[in-house]
Image (tube, rainbow, N blue to C red):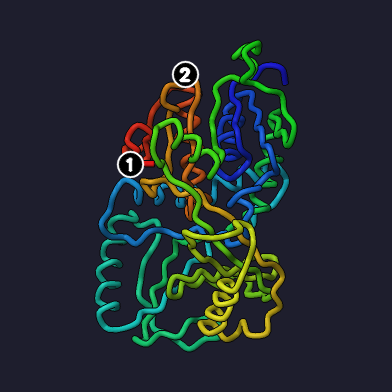
Amino acid sequence: MARVDLTVRGAGILGLSVAWAAARRGARVQVIESVAVGAGASGGVVGALAPHVPEQWNGKKAFQLDSLLMAEGWWRQVEAASGLSVGYARTGRLQPLSDAEAVVQARMRAEGAATLWRGMAEWRLVPAMGAAWEPASASGWLVQDTLTARINPRRALAALVGAIRSRGGEVIVGDAPDLDAPDRDASDRGAVVWATGVAGLADLSAALGGSAGGGIKGQALVLAHDAGMAPQLFVDGLHIVPHGDGTVAVGSTSENRWEVADSTDAQLDMLHQRAVAALPVLRGAAVLERWAGLRPRAASRAPVLGPWPGRAGQFIANGGFKIGFGMAPKIAEVMADLVLDGRDGIPDDFRVDMLRVRPA
């Protein structure tokens, strides 16, 4: 592909999603990845597409709601183009309530969801029944939401690669031509979207003269337990996610300090113990995989989208952190609008030019 309309740097969830949205609209697209597809946090194992609580509403929560609501149709298009399953299912989620105060708060949130979620999903209270796939609840009540979904991260990335290629796009891994060389015609690369995760936040920090964000380490594991279409569980900050391949993913830690970014340690052992304590049916399930990696968190704690300051024709899509897969469908469409058509639908909280960097 000698001439392209769009070059995307980085083959994680945001980069591939933006590339697919552009390719689906007829753009000539290439993705350049230096290490491997999903080499960063996108190659993890959890795959929880879960909403923020329906209260204290803001632009970030509204954007995420739109993305979660459009996710099923969006991912079905990816599957149709690639012929590959992404493991998506909107199975919902259960959360235990610790006491009477938590029950009152949950009822207020249910009222908020009835309006804010526009009748497209529910946040409701249900009595605990003591079922095997159910967390213990000291109050006797659980929150059940019908918006939460699951996806298999690695299968989703593979399907995006297949979908991009089905539309004539390229995904180049490893050695790639230097599209920034001074003797190269800018039309050889088209517009450029930088979706390079933690490394990209470091580059942005250097350009802005302060910290635009950085990496937060997470650890997670995969257990051999077939829970079928059972809902996800969220217990004391812990995600327990049944997948359609007969496994359950458990995650994750959130570490600001670490010695080795991609190594697992005793913190993951403790996470495993907490999962079994919360859901005894997992006791004895074999551990199939232990995973660790860095997730890109912007200083704003929201995704960072928009033109790269001072670089004509270059853009940023970064800062997915824990919600990258859930945000990806709408981020992809908004970035395609901006890059291909010049239509700017980026929320103020996500804008690069609104990012308040911390002193270096």
Dot 1: within a 10 Å radius of its alpha carbon, few (fewer than 14), some, or many (20 or more) residues? some
Which of the two residues, 342 or 219, is positioned nearer the viewer here?
A: 219
Dot 2: within a 10 Å radius of its alpha carbon, few (fewer than 14), some, or many (20 or more) residues? few
Q: Mark 2 and mark 1: span between their CA atoms? A: 22 Å
Classify residue 128 as left or right of residue 78. left
Residue 216 placement (x, y as % from top left): 49, 55
Residue at disc 1, secondary structure:
helix
The residue labelled by disc 1 is 349
- Among all residues in the image, which is located at the extreme right? 175
Residue at (53, 85) in percent of width and height: 277
Residue 220 placement (x, y as % from top left): 59, 66
Residue at (40, 85) in percent of width and height: 137
Residue 170 placement (x, y as % from top left): 71, 30
Residue at (62, 75) in percent of width and height: 227
Location of residue 343 by image quarter: top left
Location of residue 249 by image quarter: bottom right
The residue labelled by disc 2 is 312
Image quadrant where one finds the N terminus: top right
Which of the two residues, 214 or 137, is positioned nearer the viewer here?
A: 214
**Residue 138 to residue 208: above or below:** below
Q: Amino acid at mark 1?
A: Asp
Classify residue 221 as left or right of residue 321. right
Which of the numbered marks, if any, corresponds to residue 51?
A: none
